[in-house]
Image: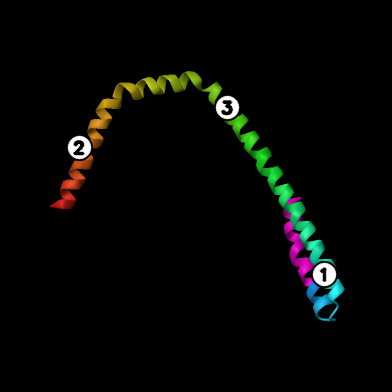
Amino acid sequence: MEAICDLLQPTIMARIIDEGVKNSQVETVIKLGLLMLMITAFGACFAATRNIVSSKVSQSFGADFGAMRMPQKRRSFKRLEQHKLMNLFEIYLINMAVLLARAG
C-alpha cells in the first residue's frame, strides 16, 4: 500500500498542473493538494506499520535461529577464548610493525 501511495503522487501532481494551474482554478489546486497530503499521511502510516512488523519478524527469526545454533555457538566461543590471548598479541605486533613502518 505504501508503494501505491508513493506512485499516486506524480499522477495527482500532473492533474494539479493540467486542471488547476493551466485553467487558473485555485479550488482544484487546493482540493488536489489536500488529497496529496492525505495520501502522504496514509503512506507514512503504512511505512511505520511496515517498519514495526519487519522489526518484530526479523527479531523473532534471529532469536529462533540463534536458539537452533546454540551448541555450535558455545563451541566457537570456547575456541575463541582459548586463542584470545595469542590473537591479541599477534594484533599488537602487527599494529606495532605498521606504526614503525609509517614512522620510518
Looking at the picture, tell me which residue is in the foreground, 33 or 69: 33
34 up-or-down from 94: above or below: below
Badge 1 marks a residue whose secondary structure is helix
Residue that sits furthest to the bottom in the current view: 23
Identity, as a three-letter code, of the amino acid under mark 2: Leu
Q: Which residues are magenta?
A: 1-14
**Rendering coords of residue 94 (x, y %):** 22, 40
Determine which residue is flagged by label 2: 93
Residue 20: quadrant of the picture? bottom right
Identity, as a three-letter code, of the amino acid under mark 3: Ala
Q: Using the numbered discs, state the Cα–Cα distance from disc 2 to disc 3 in whole angstroms.
A: 38 Å
**Rendering coords of residue 34 (x, y %):** 81, 63
Residue 10 magenta: yes
Residue 46 magenta: no
Determine which residue is flagged by label 1: 30
Q: Using the numbered discs, state the Cα–Cα distance from disc 1 to disc 2 in whole angstroms.
A: 69 Å
**Rendering coords of residue 36 (x, y %):** 78, 62
Instruction: Give left or right: position of 68 versus 87.
Output: right
Chain-order first, disc 1 or disc 3: 1
Identified at 48% across, 18% down, the residue is 71
Residue contact at pointers 1 and 2, CB within 8 angstroms:
no
Name the disc covering residue 63, or none.
3
Q: Badge 2: few (under 14), some or many (20 or more) residues near its Cα, within 10 Å? A: few
Q: Using the numbered discs, state the Cα–Cα distance from disc 1 to disc 3 in whole angstroms.
A: 50 Å
**Rendering coords of residue 70 (x, y %):** 50, 20
Identity, as a three-letter code, of the amino acid under mark 1: Ile
Identified at 12% across, 52% down, the residue is 104
